[in-house]
Image (spheres, rainbow, N blue to C red):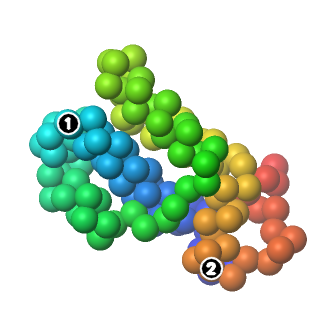
Amino acid sequence: MKLMPQEIEVRYVLPALRKQFTLALAKKEIKQKEIAKLLNITPAAVSQYMKEKRGTTRFKDNIQKEINQSINKITKNKSTAQKEIYRISNIIRHTSTICDIHRLHDEVPKSCRLCFSK
């Protein structure tokens, strides 16, 4: 295991979440500049997410459902993108989802429990 779980979050989870948020907000016909403002990223980053150049990690249905709920909260001004990305990243961090993503990008022993040790 070469990468720490935190590195997996920074390199793969956060970009993938931003991409999914970008695509979902774009489907709601929100302009790229507004998406950039909502997500606190550059318009160029929005463009790259939309062109599939960043955030290639795919999430399972349970995480996608959380993303959809978050988009609804954001578009109804009941939450912010930062709060929702943080909330979902916590779900990913505290479930086997982080392990699944880690195994895609690194050699991780099947018996690894690093993320769940105290």
Residue in the picture at 25% in, 65% down: 51
Query: On the image, numbered disc 2 is attached to which residue?
Result: 106
- From what the image shows, is residue 80 above or below residue 86? above
Looking at the image, residue 81 sits to the left or right of residue 104; the answer is left
Q: Position of residue 41 (x, y in %)?
A: 23, 48
- From what the image shows, is residue 76 above or below residue 103? above
The mark nearer the N terminus, 1 or 2, is 1
Looking at the image, residue 33 sits to the left or right of residue 82; the answer is left
Please name whichever residue, 52 or 13, is drawn nearer the observer in this view of the structure: 52
Residue in the picture at 41% in, 26% down: 72
Q: Position of residue 97 (x, y in %)?
A: 67, 56
| Amino acid bearing label 1 | Ile
Q: Secondary structure at mark 2?
A: loop
Residue in the picture at 82% in, 54% down: 117
Query: On the image, numbered disc 1 is attached to which residue?
Result: 30
Q: Position of residue 104 (x, y in %)?
A: 61, 75
